[in-house]
Image: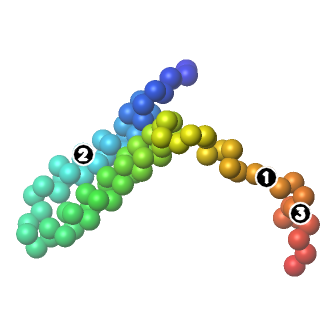
């Protein structure tokens, strides 16, 4: 089954990470003032995956860049492979 992905929110892995971030937020609500630092760190860590996915997805498909990133990448076939390197 092929799913059309138009937005990052359509990706199942994004939805999973987002759901986990919400679960962490709910689970850490009752942390006392002595553990406020732990709650803040937990929230930052749990929000990083969905945030990074959104940033990467929209920068890849953004019209902000005049040409695709892939045009700046070149492959040099003249370089020896790992088996050609002597130790």
- Taking the spot 42% from the left edge, 46% from the top edge, the residue there is 55
- Taking the spot 31% from the left edge, 46% from the top edge, the residue there is 20
* Mark sitting earlier along the chain (3/2): 2
User: Which residue has dot 3 on it?
Assistant: 80
For residue 22, say whether it is visible: yes
Q: What element carries label 1?
A: loop
Q: Tell me: 70 left or right of 81.
A: left
* Nearest to viewer (mark 1 / mark 3): 1
Q: In this view, does 38 lie above or below 65?
A: below
Mark linked to residue 22: 2
Label 3 – label 2 distance at C-alpha: 48 Å
Residue farthest to the bottom?
87
Q: Tell which of 67 and 9 is nearer to you.
A: 67
User: Which residue has dot 1 on it?
Assistant: 75
- Taking the spot 90% from the left edge, 58% from the top edge, the residue there is 78
Q: Which corner quadrant of the image does residue 82 belong to?
A: bottom right
| Residue 26, horizontal then vertical, whole percent | 17, 49
Residue farthest to the top?
1
For residue 13, say whether it is visible: no
Q: Is mark 3 on a helix, strand or loop?
A: loop
| Residue 18, horizontal then vertical, whole percent | 32, 43
* Mark sitting earlier along the chain (1/3): 1
């Amino acid at each position: 089954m092929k799913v059309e992905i138009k937005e990052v929110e359509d990706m199942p892995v994004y939805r999973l990470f987002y759901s986990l971030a919400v679960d962490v937020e709910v689970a850490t609500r009752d942390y006392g003032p002595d553990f406020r630092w732990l709650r803040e760190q937990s929230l930052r860590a749990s929000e990083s995956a969905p945030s990074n996915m959104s940033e990467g997805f929209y920068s890849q498909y953004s019209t902000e860049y005049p040409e695709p990133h892939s045009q700046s990448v070149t492959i040099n076939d003249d370089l020896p492979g790992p088996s050609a390197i002597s130790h």
